[in-house]
Amino acid sequence: MKKLSLFIIMLFCFSATAQDSSKAFHYNPDAGFQYKKRDFQWTIWAFAERLFSPSQKPIWRRVRQGMEFKLSGYPFTLKGNKYRTSVFYEVDFTDNNFFKDNKRFKIWENLYITFQNAKDANKFRILFGENTSILSREDNLSSGNLPTINRSLILEQHGSTNSFGTQWGFQVQSQVSKKTFLQASLKDNRGSLNQDKPSFEFWNAVAAKITQSVIQPNKNSKQKLNIGFAVDHTRNIKDKNYALASGIENKFIGSTPATGNKLTFENDVEYTNTLKNHFYTLEYEAIYSNYSTQKLNVAGGYGQLQFQVFDKKQLGDLVPFIRYDIVNLSNPTASATEQAIRLGVNYNLPFTNKLVNFHLEYIHHLLNGSPIILTTTDKLFDEFRLELRVNATRYLRF
């Protein structure tokens, strides 16, 4: 906690000081600490999340640090665009219990090299290494900028078969028009650097995604609507069980074998607008997977509403949310369903430039299904946690 207190004091100092981006070394509250020289740029950031509970000891949820080196542009152009290489890494010290576990390599969350558009990597980028799977929108939200402590039930639970999350392989992304964004990947999708048994067969899984910006914000409106569709096919999953778990504590609820080839479809929608100058966002994501050996079907997703009550320097930034999660497992012999209702609030503390955030979250779980899958007799149970987030970059909801 002493290190966390020191980090908070440092952030208060930086948030209270005007930063001059024209200087070679400066602080950017939306990116971190930066050094620029001509078109070379080095960025470093870090964040920490501490969980508190009335009935349990405090624990670290995430403690991450990362860097990005955007190297100088290549001395040529392609179709009028300049290109450069970026080297990127991010580590999470909780993955190996702050180096107390034997497998110290597990801290790697991201580690990759790119060839990308020099001005905007979203317009074009080829990536090789360890990076988040392209399939899920929520999976690609920054871990330090989530509305909830954990991601959706169905996304977190796919991790029990080592699917999604960070994976080893190639990614290509391109903005093919003003409103259309395409992605494709060849990845292992069975767990790589931050797993006990890493796998690096990047040709094992193929995925593709299209995201359409149906409505884009402009000078007259903050309204935004994005829709995404994705598909993933992963081969040769061995010795795995799809595990049901709770939303905050990852409490084990039940499981069933999930092996063979996995075919997954995804759809997500995000709509943002204002109501009397108050931002709000409606979003949902649905995921369906089939595991071939057991003919196991996994279907589910979430729907969520966030609403900004106020955003004032003197008062802070208050955003409550409500969310519904569902996961259904079914095979030829058994089925089970897990539902969860989440209520919570995110509060950026006053005068901190949104670098220090207080989070409160409550989840009510509802279970039903076969005892072949479910291992608990508790059909209804609750979870509650408080969280303190301290970040070198601003915590933004809209």
Image (cartoon, rainbow, N blue to C red):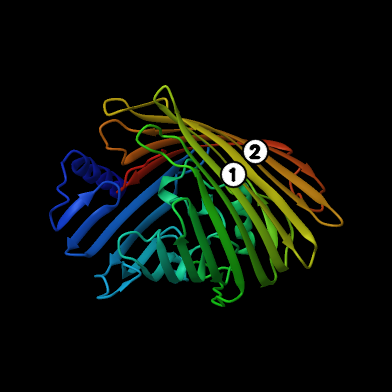
Q: Quadrant of the C terminus?
A: top left
Distance (Cα) linking label 2 and label 1: 8 Å
Q: Which residue is mark 1?
A: 247
For the residue pair 245 and 84, the one nearer the viewer reads as 84
- Residue 31, given in percent of the width and then of the height, sits at 29, 52
> Mark 1: few, some, or many residues within 10 Å (few <14, many ≥20)?
many
Q: Which residue is mark 2?
A: 340
Question: What residue sits 39% from the left and 25% below the top?
Answer: 277
The quadrant where residue 231 appears: bottom right
On the rendered structure, is 271 left or right of 394?
A: right
- Is residue 99 at least partly visible in the picture? no
- First in sequence: mark 2 or mark 1? 1
On the rendered structure, is 257 left or right of 144?
A: right
Outermost residue toward the left in this view: 23
For the residue pair 195 and 222, the one nearer the viewer reads as 222
Q: How many marks?
A: 2
For the residue pair 78 and 249, the one nearer the viewer reads as 78
On the rendered structure, is 138 left or right of 18?
A: right
Three-letter residue code for mark 1: Gly
Three-letter residue code for mark 2: Ala
For the residue pair 101 and 173, the one nearer the viewer reads as 173
Element type where label 1 sits in the image: loop
Question: What residue sits 31% from the left and 63% below the top?
Answer: 68
Labels 2 and 1 touching (C-beta < 8 A): yes
The quadrant where residue 302 appears: top right
